[in-house]
Image (cartoon, grey):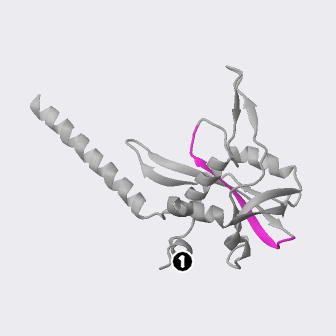
Amino acid sequence: MRKSGLGWFLGAGLVAILLAVGNLIYTCTRNDGEKYAQQYIDESKYVTLHIPKGKMDVDYGPESIMTGVLMNSTKRIRTDSILFYDSIYKKYFCVFVIEPERRKLGRQSSFVEDDISYRKTIKARINKYELNSPRYGSKANPVPVLDFDYKIAHFQNDKNSKYYEYAFSRPAYYKRAVELYLTYMMSKEEFKERFEKE
């Protein structure tokens, strides 16, 4: 009895150590997006973007970004994208819908795409550096859109007649999207150049 109890204890201790090491690796290899999210937001402004009718490139790919390790799974975020070319700015823009990966709930990006596809313009909050920099605006590196005047979608659950709202473009969602974008999506080189200059 003692041997099996000791083996279980050692096994549980080893699993805890491996989880801690795994999470430490993910923590050390990412940018400190939370620290600079407010600066990114403060250096952003609202602009009117023009949506080309029927010419959006939507990516609901299976890809997701691993953000940590749990006991028997991983923590991930999904980054769906809606790409379009604005003929006034002469740049590509990409609406990123960044959210925790959830298997049972519908994706916010499908509602966001529906909202954009019926409009000629959206009022988007864009970081000024990314809007004006020649490094942004190509199809390969579009200007990121993390917030715009999205009309919050409501849908009803038939079982209990409750209405649910998708959170895209609420202030808390926007701030969290900026944190995730800076932490996991921006390259370490660019992050260091823009936010960690000495």
Magenta-colored span? 88-103
- Label 1, on which residue? 193
On the image, the x and y values in percent for residue 139 come to 73, 70
What's the residue at 41%, 59% (across, down)? Answer: 27
Q: Tell me, yes or no, if residue 175 can be seen here.
A: yes
Which residue is the extreme one toward the left? Answer: 2
On the image, the x and y values in percent for residue 97 come to 66, 52
What's the residue at 71%, 79% (across, down)? Answer: 134
Q: Looking at numbered disc 1 in the image, what kind of residue is underneath it? A: Glu
User: Could you tell me what secondary structure mostly forms the magenta stretch?
Assistant: strand
- Secondary structure of the residue carrying tag 1 is helix
Q: Is residue 123 left or right of residue 20?
A: right
Q: Tell me, yes or no, if residue 140 can be seen here.
A: no
What's the residue at 29%, 45% (across, down)? Answer: 16
What's the residue at 45%, 47% (across, down)? Answer: 74
- Please say if 36 is above or below 11: below
